[in-house]
Amino acid sequence: MSRAEAAEAFARCSNAGRWGAEDELGTLNLITPDVRRRAAALVVEGVSVSLGSDIDTVQRPLNPRPAWHVMHLNEGGLPYATGDSVHVDIHGVDTHLDALGHVYLDGQGYNGRRQNEVVTHDGLRANSIHAMRHGIFTRGVLLDVAAALAVPWLDEDHVVTRADLEAAERHAGVTAEAGDAVVVHTGLERRAGERDTGEIVARAGLGLEAVSWLYDRDVAVFAGDCVDRLPPSDSGLELPLHQIGIAATGLALLDWPRLTDLLRALERYGRSTFLLTAAPLRIPGGTGSPVNPIATF
Amino acid sequence: MSRAEAAEAFARCSNAGRWGAEDELGTLNLITPDVRRRAAALVVEGVSVSLGSDIDTVQRPLNPRPAWHVMHLNEGGLPYATGDSVHVDIHGVDTHLDALGHVYLDGQGYNGRRQNEVVTHDGLRANSIHAMRHGIFTRGVLLDVAAALAVPWLDEDHVVTRADLEAAERHAGVTAEAGDAVVVHTGLERRAGERDTGEIVARAGLGLEAVSWLYDRDVAVFAGDCVDRLPPSDSGLELPLHQIGIAATGLALLDWPRLTDLLRALERYGRSTFLLTAAPLRIPGGTGSPVNPIATF
Amino acid sequence: MSRAEAAEAFARCSNAGRWGAEDELGTLNLITPDVRRRAAALVVEGVSVSLGSDIDTVQRPLNPRPAWHVMHLNEGGLPYATGDSVHVDIHGVDTHLDALGHVYLDGQGYNGRRQNEVVTHDGLRANSIHAMRHGIFTRGVLLDVAAALAVPWLDEDHVVTRADLEAAERHAGVTAEAGDAVVVHTGLERRAGERDTGEIVARAGLGLEAVSWLYDRDVAVFAGDCVDRLPPSDSGLELPLHQIGIAATGLALLDWPRLTDLLRALERYGRSTFLLTAAPLRIPGGTGSPVNPIATF
Amino acid sequence: MSRAEAAEAFARCSNAGRWGAEDELGTLNLITPDVRRRAAALVVEGVSVSLGSDIDTVQRPLNPRPAWHVMHLNEGGLPYATGDSVHVDIHGVDTHLDALGHVYLDGQGYNGRRQNEVVTHDGLRANSIHAMRHGIFTRGVLLDVAAALAVPWLDEDHVVTRADLEAAERHAGVTAEAGDAVVVHTGLERRAGERDTGEIVARAGLGLEAVSWLYDRDVAVFAGDCVDRLPPSDSGLELPLHQIGIAATGLALLDWPRLTDLLRALERYGRSTFLLTAAPLRIPGGTGSPVNPIATF
């Protein structure tokens, strides 16, 4: 893809100005009071399931800087208390929520803000994770692309298309609506389970077409066992979900959720929708936050 | 208080064995499917408000080891991505959820587990924050003790009693029930706002009587702008909320929530209850986790 | 100063190519075997004195990200061992040695290497502190500018000149020679001691003229209770010692040494020279290292 | 070995009281001005060689918590400066100097200080690395046990004895004297080089007899490619070099130096002694410090 084509895609999927020049919330604006009320009404079985990963202290190719978890000697000097600290690389393999200021296309970020104006040594001046501090509370919809295509997992060079997502909608009998959190399943955890290493670098992911579909449908949150197809297949637009979805659309991206427990619960209850809640740590100027998203049925 | 009296209080408020010898969830067991369903039904206005604090990078007496937030040079080496890392002391002033294995009385912790068997260099062998990984989803009830006593804030040597909590119930017109999250307001943030430093070391807090009341009422989660009265007034039982509430009752303690925005919202909507959600990071063996609790109305 | 004048100063003080196109050692090349031998011969009294600062865990204007020092629970799980970890911001107030790749003028660094080619997310590709891994072992010469000018400390807007340094040489009765470590004293610690805060932001420092003198004299190491005059007085060349001294000359800069103990020892022994040793941690790709320089008499 | 026998060994090798009740320096007291002067006189070739390891960011069995090295975005906000931070576990595989308060036998540490009195949440109250802040400056003596026994490396269950050390003395033609730094070579790096992993957990090391010999000879510093025999072979006294050498004798232990470059230099110059310098970071209350020891010939 040429640079001009990438810029065109950016313009087409942009929400710049849609919620005002000051906006830093992006598609989370689509989670209206009404969306929240309807999401709350999805709580029927009354059961919660985590979509988060364990903080990962094991070094692997995708986790070059594993988290430190250190047990302290006597919390606060009190012999009857025990404490600890954690040191976490936010955009590693631990489940996290990306800030809108995390990524750019040709220096252009969400809502007309430029990378060189926003990104500073002290943190993001705008579009930081702090803008999302009141959290995500919306309907989650599982789009099981692997199931819709009747494969255990998508091949590593599969680029998820608009047609794939709509096939998954039909398979679920649900239509993604404005304000939804779309959870795409490509079978990655199943595929990783078959491997020795449990680590998969090359993997299926969304192409520009799918990213446009998220924009067209006014999806508020993307989560999935995939993000962009990796490694990037198009040097003109390496990461369409990040560089168009986040930077142009202002899409909230929940990166690296774990779906195995969610799928099991959805199957058990015969459902494909649920209430999704997630709240980032309030890191002023942060480019993201580790997070433990919860599905409640 | 003598050591024997403290042990007696421990025994009286103990939930050891109540949910089986293997239990690590404590009072979160009281958040049943029915409790979750009723909590979800509290979402009426469809608005969410954070009870979390900003990750605090400023050193002060109560924050001796301020968080580090470091902006990285090019996330993953990509010039169009920006990333960062955080290093956080869990039991500092940032809003956090305590694990049940965080604290002990005379070496005795939740569900019959002893400190010297549970606490290791690699993390807690049991009662860690990981046990709470599916999060908190329950009714939050504001017990505004300051308002009930018609004071802007409780004096720093005020020990909150059973009567205080029940006065706050009457003031709210609500009764704390099994599985509830009780949010006690003593006016601390208002008091801090009047001070130059914004830092208050000596402060009102719960006494043993109030802790017993939480046990009697089967409260699942305690949150508040106070914990124990500080500094400890009784060397025989320094921190009753921690050493009895957590270690005997197995109470989930949300430490250091910020209540100002919550109070404003409750007043705006003329409510005293709401849906409270909070999900700790999944830190294996962790003694707690930073968390951003959310009230949804 | 104009950009062209700054570039001219850079060219005039440059050691690019002097020790070959591959060189990453800079002025440490001037510490020849003969220089080391003569430096060793300065050990007469047989006493060592540290010029290092205590790792500083207190937050202040010049130490915005104070070091973390955390005591661990049982080192390696052994009850009879105690361990800890440290998290240090290298270019903070703790005594440190700068790598030659730490700083640039208009993107130009030591030995013809450009900032955008050398500086990466994974570390410096060249001119890193690792190049200095065999350490500093040379003659240290105290140039006490404050004493030479007969003032307790230099005024905060004093820009140290060539004449100041030569006055200090005469005062000491010593001439700075090729390979020497020059330790400039401006009285900063004395001045700080008179202040409440102990923290001095505005301070005397070297101007371009003094930096040229270091180049002319083939000084190998600069250390002092000053660096550049701060805050920068010339926006065309903010930090001549850093941007010319390090980036053009390839000068090894020991930043933030503490001189009080050194001065006391020099006075006690009636000396102005000594053996200076310092060895950076071997941080691959690092832009510097905390270090504890030692003077031996 | 019985507990009583271990205590007896402790008493026999103890330097408690030898340098006064307040002493925290231990065997570094043996590095007298005269020792320093004679060590300085060893500088003949005028060449320095590092004995330090690269800060290790790779996770392996012996490095479970690898160091973090993070490149920052613009040091201090200056576009022409680049900076970084390091987070290091002190008693990992990076070359470090142990504080005397790092280890204990039955709660007993150097100079009559007890573990439970010295070790606190805030750091060591005594015997911390800060006591060694003026560094090590002494004669280093290579005792090449592998060469003396004419093997490429010692077998992993070899316990180094008094006879081994004296054989190595004869092989070198040197006698270890009071105040010396003894560098023992067992061939570990050579052995590791033959392995795929480069990681050797089971390894030769010093037994109690060798530790007694260090005491008898008034050795000031131990360094080597071995410490205690690992894993411990005697549960009654797991780590004699640590639990007797450090805790009773007050021996300065340089842990994990790298010897390959040193051996090469010693061979090149036909020497077995050299000037050894090492200076710990001044970590108040620290149990040790990463360090880069330097041999100068």
Image (cartoon, coloured by chain):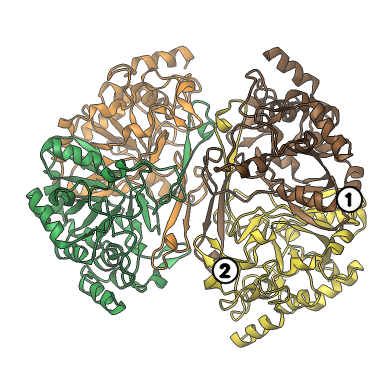
Chain colours: A yellow, B brown, C green, D orange
Which numbered circle lies on residue D64?
A: none
The spot of residue A171 in percent (x, y) is 89, 69
The residues tagged by marks 1 and 2 sit, at their Cα atoms, a distance apart of 40 Å
In the image, taking residue D87 as reference, residue D51 lies left or right, namely left
Q: Say if residue B15 shows up in the picture.
A: no
- The residue wearing badge 2 is B81
Q: Quadrant of residue A176?
A: bottom right
Q: A79 or B145: which is nearer to us?
A: B145
Q: Residue at x 90, y 53 (%)?
A: A43
Q: Secondary structure at mark 1?
A: loop
Q: Quadrant of residue C208?
A: bottom left
Type of the residue with mark 1: Leu
Q: Residue at x 38, y 45 (%)?
A: D189
Mark 1 is surrounded, within 10 Å at the Cα level, by few (under 14), some (14 to 19) or many (20 or more) other residues, namely many
Type of the residue with mark 2: Ala
| Chain containing the residue with disc 2 | B
The spot of residue C285 in percent (x, y) is 40, 59
In the image, taking residue A282 as reference, residue B137 lies left or right, namely right
Q: Residue at x 41, y 43 (%)?
A: C56
Q: Quadrant of residue C24?
A: bottom left
Q: Secondary structure at mark 2?
A: loop
Closer to the chain start, of discs 1 and 2, is 1
Whether D166 is drawn above or below B271: the answer is above
Q: Say if residue B48 shows up in the picture.
A: yes
The spot of residue A175 in percent (x, y) is 88, 71
Quadrant showing the N terminus of chain B: top right
Q: Residue at x 23, y 32 (%)?
A: D180
Q: A121 or D185: which is nearer to us?
A: A121
In the image, taking residue B120 as reference, residue A293 lies left or right, namely right
- The residue wearing badge 1 is B42
Residues marked 1 and 2, same chain: yes
Whether A10 is drawn above or below A171: the answer is below
